[in-house]
């Protein structure tokens, strides 16, 4: 038996505030990219290839944040059994899969000119690929399990286990000898690039929050429609 | 070499925007589809013949 939490959590229709937030996030992203591209000097060693940082690094950070959100919502679901938390975890997982996929693509576009290869099985790249596959597996699991309660429980377990991989991805460049450089952060990069990376990180964060919120809205509506259909079916007997 | 690098930089930004705008369109389509399904499900009892 499902509880009607999805109906209680249903976002208000025509929520213009979130639509405006989405427009703001896109404009902020465009502005941050323009600022970074136009103001940052070429790197001494990498030249203009350094400009890939402004999309690759924020995308990688979002790939690590999203599993953190999956972990938090999955734990909260197992604790409170609130259906909205399950839907939030699923939304974060889908968005995380998109960003980790993008991170891999951008990494390859960086690797070819910088290292001479599209792909190498080093610890950072491999662990990021594993993270991507875990998130895809999480979404596949949800697609195959029909019972909402069982689906929520199983995917919460996978989400919690999968989130363990995020710190492994982050620490992989320290724990193993890798071709990938150490973690990119304001402390490891030239001050000329810090503001551009920060602005783009916030832009990616805003876009990710917007995506998760919209995906959650769709998931709530889907569940509410299922609840309504169930109620009609039971009432019609 | 520098021009080749710019090709990779351009490809990275194009890939980013394709992903973001593509997923944007996907999510909005999902919301529209779900809202239609919800409206249909909640309107169903009233539209069924023979029911009060």
Image (cartoon, coloured by chain):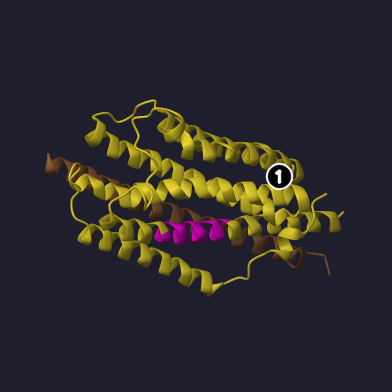
Q: Position of residue A88 (x, y in %)?
A: 62, 54
| Residue in the picture at 72% in, 63% down | A7
Chain label for disc 1: A
In the rendered image of the structure, the colour used to display chain B is: brown
| A161, above or below A233, in the image | above
Q: Position of residue B26 (x, y in %)?
A: 47, 53
Quarter of the image for residue B4 reads top left
**Chain given the colour yellow:** A
The crowd level at tag 1 (other Cα within 10 Å; few <14, some 14-19, many 20+) is many
Q: Main secondary structure of the magenta part?
A: helix
* Residue B43 located within the stretch drawn in magenta: no
Task: Identify which residue, A70 or A229, lies in the foreground.
Answer: A70
* Residue A204 located within the stretch drawn in magenta: yes
In this orientation, does residue A218 appear? Answer: yes
Residue tagged by mark 1?
A152
Q: Which residues are magenta?
A: A202-215
Task: Identify which residue, A224 or A137, lies in the foreground.
Answer: A137
Mark 1 secondary-structure assignment: helix
Q: Position of residue B31 (x, y in %)?
A: 55, 59
| A168, above or below A5, in the image | above
| Residue in the picture at 46% in, 50% down | A62
Q: Quadrant of the C terminus of chain B?
A: bottom right
| Residue in the picture at 34% in, 53% down | B17
In this orientation, does residue B14 appear? Answer: no
Task: Identify which residue, B24 or A36, lies in the foreground.
Answer: A36
| A3, above or below A121, in the image | below
Specify whether A191 is left or right of A41: right
Residue farthest right in this picture: A237
| A169, above or below A221, in the image | above
Residue farthest front in this picture: A187
Specify whether A187 is left or right of A170: left
Specify whether A144 is left or right of A14: right
């Amino acid at each position: 038996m499902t509880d009607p939490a999805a109906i209680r959590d249903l976002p208000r229709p025509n929520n213009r505030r979130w639509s405006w937030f989405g427009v703001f996030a896109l404009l902020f992203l465009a502005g941050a990219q323009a600022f970074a591209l136009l103001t940052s000097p070429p790197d001494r060693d990498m030249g203009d290839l350094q400009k890939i940082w402004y999309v690759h690094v924020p995308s990688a950070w979002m790939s690590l944040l999203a599993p953190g959100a999956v972990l938090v919502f999955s734990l909260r679901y197992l604790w409170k059994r609130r259906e909205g938390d399950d839907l939030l975890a699923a939304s974060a997982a889908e968005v995380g899969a998109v960003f980790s996929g993008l991170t891999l693509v951008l990494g390859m576009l960086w690797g070819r000119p910088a290292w001479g290869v599209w792909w190498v099985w080093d610890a950072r790249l491999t662990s990021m690929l594993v993270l991507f596959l875990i998130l895809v597996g999480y979404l596949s699991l949800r697609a195959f399990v029909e019972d909402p309660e069982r689906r929520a429980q199983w995917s919460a377990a996978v989400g919690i286990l999968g989130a363990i991989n995020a710190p492994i991805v982050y620490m992989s460049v320290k724990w193993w000898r890798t071709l990938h450089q150490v973690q990119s952060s304001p402390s490891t990069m030239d001050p000329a690039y810090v503001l551009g990376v920060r602005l783009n990180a916030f832009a990616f964060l805003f876009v990710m929050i917007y995506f998760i919120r919209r995906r959650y809205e769709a998931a709530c509506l889907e569940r509410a429609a299922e609840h309504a259909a169930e109620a009609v079916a039971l009432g019609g007997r | 070499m520098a021009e080749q690098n710019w090709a990779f930089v351009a490809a990275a930004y194009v890939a980013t925007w394709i992903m973001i705008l593509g997923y944007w369109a996907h999510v909005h389509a999902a919301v529209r589809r779900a809202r239609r399904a919800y409206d249909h499900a909640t309107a169903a009892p009233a539209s069924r013949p023979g029911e009060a």
